[in-house]
Image: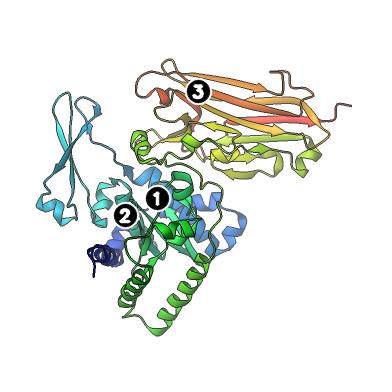
Amino acid sequence: MSHLQVEFLQRLTINSRHVLKYENVTLQAKAKACVPLPELLTRTQQNCSSDAKSDPKLFRDALLVELLTWFKNDFFTWFDAAHCNSCNRRMENAGLGVPTAEDVKYGASRVEKFKCSLCGATDRFPRYNDPEKLLETRRGRCGEWANCFTLICRALKYDARYVLDWTDHVWTEVYSERLNRWLHCDSCEAVCDKPLLYEVGWGKKLTYVVAFSKDEVQDVTWRYTKDHKETRAKRQLVSEDWLLQQCDRLSRQLQSSLGYSQRELLTLRLIGELAEFLLPPKVKAGEDQGRISGDVNWRQTRGELGLLKKGHKPVVWTPSENELVTGEFCLEYSASLDKYIRRSDGNKLTENWSNGAFEAQSIFRKLEKDWGMAYLARTEGSERGCLSWKFDLSSTNLAILQVSVSCPGTTFEDGEITWKICCTDCEVDLTGSKWCVLSAEMSRGRGDNAWQHTQIARQSTKELNQFPLSLRIFFGSLD
């Protein structure tokens, strides 16, 4: 066996054993106790459709989305660098330290050291690999996030597996009984079922992606790439036959104590998954989004800013059949829910601020967990952010009669938000226009946090029924 095969097999074996920790009943009980399940069930009831409320399998998938949101916003914290409490500033990386016996006990063979450049204070960050310890520390980067989240999924009886990307990322997959397939779940990004996020959004050049569970070790690379031929050409570490044999051997070992019916169910599941891999997936909405977890400079160094560099695919709102009858379009947005509600068309909801925006340059949604606030802001380090929404009647014989807007903006220091509403060649008076654009430009501010000194639609995360940003348009015939 070559040294590359030895290293590859070692990595497969270590992770296939690691995931068995999630099956400890006592540990699962401890993890479940951390989850505010009644609150998440209530949120699911409030946010899911009437179909989901009557379909247990659909409701279970909807609960998974709420679990992801809770984990990112309320439970776990991203760690970039230690913070000096005396100087109230970010510490600088000071290399690696020596793990203590306590560190090693919880799987932290790597310890990062930090030092304050002003007062000389030091701190250390052990990279714990023990999911039980992570229930206590509740911080880390993607490895810690996926490790802890996968445990919590197992504690709630989801069939979950830990997914390792050889190009340096980790996430979770959860099996959907409703869809009869595995769902990609990234707790760092709070996204579900967006497998092309890394290749399309982050710009990753994937090679090997392997999933580990108590029952199997499975090469799932083909779920995460839209160009199978190009990806296969990059897989040079081991042969495809060798990898298939090793995954199959490890899976058989894990299933050795299972009964015939359980093994048969897993085999049928695997056949369905392999059939899914035959055709490259197509890009879905939201999969072209750049990475949001981690310091902006760190993400930029890794080349994972995605849409923050590439720009945004424009969304244009046009009248529905209901709106053509009433002659009114009313769209509102809530930063706390990160949803649009279309009041004029049966209160239809659209997830994610970017799925309703016409223009979006250097914009993201900020959640302040400590203060319990949410808002839209320009991205960290950017001098200017632009955001706009467009309504278009060009496909009809109607025109705009009147426009009413509510544009809540909050500024600090000398931060500046400039709002405009315009049509082809005019501002303010839109009567007779076929389309209009409501836009906001955020700029200025002071210091390292200048990006945070301009905020749109700022509101409490407890405000679940308020949609402060509003665009209301009346239209009809000018005759």
Of labels 3 and 2, earlier in sequence is 2
- Which residue type carries mark 2? Cys
Of labels 1 and 3, earlier in sequence is 1
Image location of residue 152, percent across then percent down: 35, 58
| Distance between the alpha carbons at the discs numbered 2 and 1 | 9 Å
Classify residue 221 by image quadrant.
bottom left
Classify residue 430 by image quadrant.
top right
Image location of residue 216, percent across then percent down: 36, 71
Tag 1 and tag 3, C-beta contact below 8 Å = no
Tag 2 and tag 1, C-beta contact below 8 Å = yes
- Which residue type carries mark 1? Ser
Q: Which mark is residue 11?
A: none
- Label 1's element? loop
Q: Which mark is residue 148?
A: 2
Image location of residue 80, percent across then percent down: 29, 38
Q: How many marks?
A: 3
Q: Nearer the viewer, mark 3 or mark 2?
A: 3
- Label 3's element? strand
